[in-house]
Amino acid sequence: MFLFSGSHSEKKAKRGVMEFDALLKEAAKGLVVRTDSRKILPGDCFVAMPGTSVRGIDYIPGALDRGAAYIVAPAQARDLVAPVAEKRARVAYHENPAVALGELARAHFHLPDRDLKLVGVTGTNGKTTTTYIIEHLLAATGLKVGVLGTVSYRWPGFSMNAPLTTPDCWMIHELLFNMKKADVDVAVMEVSSHALDQYRVAGLDFDAGVLTNVTQDHLDYHGDMETYFNAKSRLFTGCLRQGRPGIINYNDPYGRRLLADLDDAIGYGIGDTAIVTHQVGDKPMVQGRILSLTGQGMEIETSYKGKTWTVQSPLIGAYNAMNLLAAQAVGLQLGLTCRDMRALKDFAGVPGRLERVVNDRDLDIFVDYAHTPDALENVQHTLKSLDFKRLITVFGCGGDRDRAKRPLMARAVARYADVAVLTSDNPRSEPPEAIMDDARPGLAKAARIIEHPDRQTAITLAVAEMEPGDVLLIAGKGHEDYQQIAGTTIHFSDREAAIKAIEETR
């Protein structure tokens, strides 16, 4: 893996080339490693990370000027790096500096020496809810659980808002180190496709990995669905601890592909597994059957390896049944019993995931994070099945993101909503009106359309539209409490906006 020049150690020492194993030993002794050249302090190690728009090697001179004593550079850039760095610092060459960073972080924080189980959850939809359910299920058995996810990074006694679904590699290792210092037993992590593609989980060995589903998202980054799927698959093909199975949704077409490719895997899903087994081989299956599904919750029958038990939950929607099954599959792999699953009846839900906005007018208003076509389909289908008179859906599309999914999101809304309310989400650097123009063709078959680029105004118009028996879904931002508009971040909460709209429309 590691490439070096020179025929013997004396020559390498003179030229400043350092074997990576020696650098790992320095990291284990406390060497500080950084990927931002502006933060380098004398004696630090600078890792020249690969990038999509900039090259890490371009920042090596700045790192050296700030006193970097060690450099990790890509092997393929040796000819460019050597004249600049080898006479001023010790340089280790690696075919992928992003992977090297993970190994350095692993050594620095002594992760192999720490008895901390690690669970990774990836997929287009359901990651956050699934991690919350796993956290609840494990904590109910007396385990201390930490979570790294979209909403927050937290463990008992600590919580901070999450700037990224999956933080950068060094920060992940540092957070896990701090979890173990707090005697956390299990860490549960949402693992995004970006993080997998950028090797942010390098140096980690997962004890369990979950694939919830794969539907269209992030194609502005990945380019096509196959590349997106391959990125998700890395959690299972390169990050699981030896002998630990992937936990894969067998109802998802991409999930069945992955199940067929993996030697160690467990399927989970709803419905008969006979056809699935024919496609993916004879693999263990956590099979669910929905016994009841109402506005007050659900009852699920779960079967695994000859045992069958019943779970009750206040969550609503068939997609939440899938999240409950995934969490149970993880629990079983970590040693929980079917009796431990009873704790799921006490799990109330996740902030911003079909979260009810409690109000004194008894209006049925829900806030949800759905921001993909598939997620919009799922959450609207759930609400339409609960015998409300009409469904009113407020939605927008993010700026500087996959433009191709905008009309698809609108089409999903038109398919279910009696009233479609088109507005902005996080427009970022794009004009909200231009984003709405991209989405509008998907509303061609909508029964009724309301439009306004200001999200607060749109929500107020939606509340004013409500009649007795209607349900209002405000989709897209969920737990988020901000909007990004023209380079500025402002405070904005859909839940707070709904309460304000209720007051204004009395």
Image (cartoon, rainbow, N blue to C red):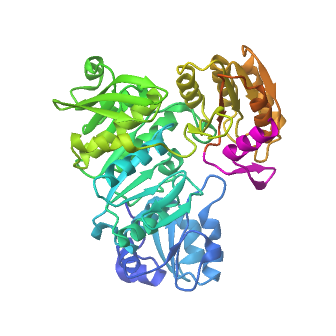
Magenta includes 206?
Answer: no
Can residue 395 be seen here? yes
Magenta includes 481?
Answer: yes
User: Which of the 4 quarters of the picture holds residue 252?
Assistant: top left
Residue nearest the observer in this picture, 212 or 10: 212
In the image as oriented, which residue stretches furthest toward the left?
306
Q: Position of residue 186 (x, y in %)?
A: 33, 58
Residue at x-position 38% and y-position 23%? 292
Left or right of residue 371, residue 178 in this image: left
Q: Position of residue 289 (x, y in %)?
A: 32, 24
User: Which of the 4 quarters of the picture holds residue 107?
Assistant: bottom left
Residue at x-position 56% and y-position 68%? 35
Q: Which residues are magenta?
A: 479-506
Can residue 206 be seen here? no
Residue at x-position 32% and y-position 39%? 247
Residue nearest the observer in this picture, 299 or 60: 299
Quadrant showing the N terminus:
bottom left
- In the rendered view, tell whether residue 376 sits above or below residue 137: above
In the image as oriented, which residue stretches furthest toward the front?
360
User: Which of the 4 quarters of the picture holds residue 442?
Assistant: top right
Quadrant showing the C terminus:
top right
Left or right of residue 432, residue 96 in this image: left
Q: Position of residue 420 (x, y in %)?
A: 72, 24
Q: Position of residue 23 (x, y in %)?
A: 40, 76
Residue at x-position 72% and y-position 21%? 419
- In the rendered view, tell whether residue 142 sits above or below residue 264: below
Could you tell me how many numbered marks the image carries? 0
